[in-house]
Image (cartoon, rainbow, N blue to C red):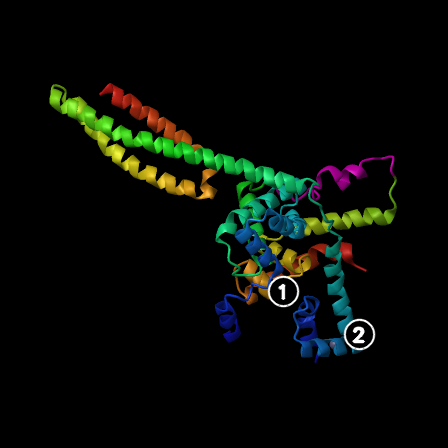
Amino acid sequence: MDCKRLKSQIYEYLDNELQEADMQQFSEHLGACAECQKAYEAIKRTWDALEVLPNVEPTPNYMSRFWAEVATRQNVVDRARARLSQMFLTWKLVPVYVSLCLAISVFAIRNYMQFEQSRQILAEMSQEEIEMVEYIELAENYELIDEIEFFEDFEIIQNLDDLSVTQS
Amino acid sequence: MVEFLFRENNIEQYLDDPDAKLMLKFKEEEDPSAFEELMRKNFSRIMNFIYRFVADRELAEDLTQEVFIKIYNSASNYYPRSKFKTWAFTIARNISLNELRKNKGQVVSLDKPFKHGEDDMSLQVEDKTVSKPDDEIIKEELVDAVGKAINELPANQRTAILLIRYEGFSYEEIARTMNTTVSAVKSLLSRARETLKEKLADIVSG
Ligand SMILES: [Zn+2]
């Protein structure tokens, strides 16, 4: 092994990634060559210096903290799931109200605007129903349930529609 | 390459991994003590990796908890497709990266020494009544310099360096953890080492 080759293998040597034959040649050359020893020592010094970083320990109650967190999240998921299925039931009823309103509007005929409005609500409604199904699928995925915002959005939508329904 | 393919196809190769066995025990018997043993064996190690990645002790503990919650939630679908440690460190790396992205410029303040929480070394330094021997001061400077130098590495280089230096991972294991190739790992490591060598040259000399 020549000096150039040895110098190119210093890191692999330190990382314990040299094949056994290479490892042996490396050690032999290193033991006999002052120049390579110097290069090796310089690299090893920096590498050894990284050792100084302190280790940290988890707080003694980390295990109970963990189980408490698991329980809390399970609770959130359970509630969210219950909430969603509850909402879903409500939502299933909404189109019925809308159809009813629509029917009344058509029957009354007097107010074209009102008819138009009801038709619009119905169109939006079916789109949101599709979203609803998607939300339930998302809810199954534990990850996304942390992002609770969509529940708030939902409430707003729901309230809006309650208003529209009572309006028409 | 042939060996690589062969290993990929051998789906039972990781069943002997003791941590994988614990995961399966937890999955099949729903035995929380199996999961607790997994935590006892790995929590501190993963926490130290994250700590060196985000440079904040408390944050590191919270993120490590996230790692184990993820592992816990994956248990029902678990099958060992890799060593437990490479899998767990992949999760740890992803969670740390997300955290850094979320708090870009907030979490890692490069001028600050590593935050240790209550047992913060810098707090002790400010206590004027305690006089410190010179070599202790030199050591603190070294700790700060090393912490800062590692922190300033790009995230991928930092991951590779932490895994090889403090976790004793092989190139292959790092590649798996980072979902990349062994040659990419070698290149990340060599760039990281060049940078570390330059930055620590003054303080490590002699
Ligand atoms: Zn030589």
* 1 vs 2, front mark: 1
Where is residue B62 shown, x and y percent of the image?
Answer: 61, 41
Q: Which residues are magenta?
A: B106-130
Residue A43 position by quadrant: bottom right
Q: Identify which residue is drawn at 57% across, 54% down.
A: B25
| In the rendered image, the vertical position of residue B131 relative to residue B27, given as above or below | above
- Ligand 1 falls in quadrant: bottom right
As measured in the structure, the alpha-carbon distance from the residue carrying label 1 to the one carrying label 2 is: 29 Å
Tell me what residue is drawn at x 53 percent, y 65 percent. B181
Name the residue tied to disc 2.
Answer: A34
> Which image quadrant: the C terminus of chain B?
bottom right
Q: Which residue is mark 1?
A: B170
**Camera-side residue: B6 or B100?**
B6
Magenta span has B121? yes
Mark 2 CB lies closer than 8 A to ligand 1:
yes
Q: What residue type is disc 2 on?
A: Ala
Residue B75 x, y percent position in the rendering: 52, 51
Q: Nearer the viewer, residue B127 or A63?
A: A63
Please identify the dominant SS of the magenta region: loop
| Residue B43 % position (x, y) | 65, 49
Q: Is residue B10 magenta?
A: no
Side (left or right) of B120 relative to A164: right
